[in-house]
Image: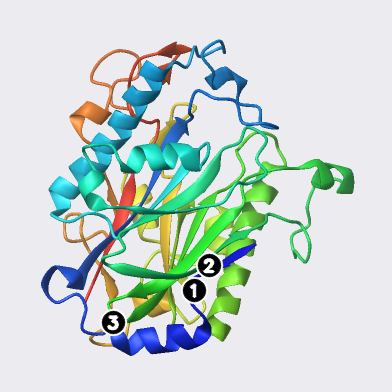
Amino acid sequence: MKRYLYSLLILALALPAYSAYGQGSGKRHIIGFYNLENLFDTYHDEGKNDYEYLPDGANEWTEAKYHKKLANMARVIAEMKKDNGVWHTVLGVSEIENRHVLEDLVIEPAIADANYQIVHYDGPDRRGVDVALFYDPSKMTLVESESIPYSFEGSAIPFRMTKEEQDAFRTRDILMAHGIIDGEHFAFYVCHLPSRLGEKSGDLRARGGEIVYNHFRQMEQKYPGIKCVVMGDMNDNPTDESMAVYLRGRETIGEMVPGDFFSPFLSMLKAGYSSLYYRGESNIYDCILVSYNLAKAPAGTFEIVPITKKKYYGRIFSKPFMTNQSGQYKGTPFRTFSNGAFVGGYSDHYPTYIVIKK
């Protein structure tokens, strides 16, 4: 399914038309990702297993808890704007139930001034969680978006799943949106790859990386020179096969060749940074990767720039209010539920972002 906002002719005309946009603050853009940790409303979505997030469900998910969650998510986004001085131009999100929760979030008082527009498709995940994308229409003109199905067809991966298991498997689709920022053409992919449950799950995330990579190479053929950002909760570290092999994520810009992606959080993982803790171990599953054309950009065009200690090209955004300050989970993200009880926190993931500049 595709949503066409402009024809190819309009796209061609838009490229020069927007070249003057972005004098001053428009020369620097924040591109990020945030796993919102089960942002569900209090209503049942037909055909979805969302029963634990109903008022009479296991989580006793009331309107009061839902609105507390919305306010918490908005606070984090607003704090990132406070640190950066500008709203995100593009912010990918995951673990959201439907368009309704997105519409409620973007009108929260803390972030309403951002005027975020929404790109979202209902996907096949059995719990009903999807990915989505917010964008600032004053900075990016959306051209087209697409929900890319997760499938096993045409893969080079020797899956350990049987054909019957593959046919029964359901997970999140991958969202792709492309548009114009200050006269330059960008594609954004938002992912939430399969979980780490089961010994065969690594193949599934490798397939997710393969799907994104193959789709972008097709986009490059269709739109020569397009720049790309891949983001999401990969359920893998930047060193894992899905990111390092199938997405060809490289640790440094210097080692890249055309067709590679730069993986800025790979070196940060090795340096001890983390965006979440899984089974007590520090990880960066909230990955952002950029294509060769954005990492080794032509002079005078947008390129990724260092932002953390003027050394690392990514940032993991955490503040004391987002972090457990005491107890068993001290130093880890302050999440919504802990040991089955509502604790009113934020997310079990920290958001990540990059900065592009020219």
As rendered, which of 111 and 235 lies closer to the eye?
Answer: 111
Q: Which mark is residue 18?
A: 3
Q: What element carries label 2?
A: loop
Disc 2 marks which residue?
248
- Please state, as top left, top right, bottom left or bottom right, where the N terminus lies in the image: bottom right
Looking at the image, residue 48 sits to the left or right of residue 333; the answer is right
* In contact (CB < 8 Å): disc 3 and disc 2: no
Colour scheme: rainbow
* Mark sitting earlier along the chain (3/2): 3
Q: Which residue is drawn at 55% across and 43% down?
A: 130
Q: How many marks?
A: 3
Query: Measured from the top left, where is residue 141 in percent x and y?
Result: 36, 70
**Mark 1 or mark 2, earlier in chain:** 2
Q: Nearer the viewer, mark 1 or mark 3?
A: 3
Which of labels 3 and 2 is toward the front? 3
Asked if residue 274 can be seen in this view, the reply is: no
Residue count near mark 2 (Cα–Cα under 10 Å), binned few <14, some 14–19, many ≥20: many
First along the sequence among labels 1 and 3: 3
Label 3 crowding class (10 Å Cα cut-off): few <14, some 14-19, many 20+? Answer: some
Q: Which of 22 and 321 is in front in this view?
A: 22
| Residue at the disc numbered 1 | 260
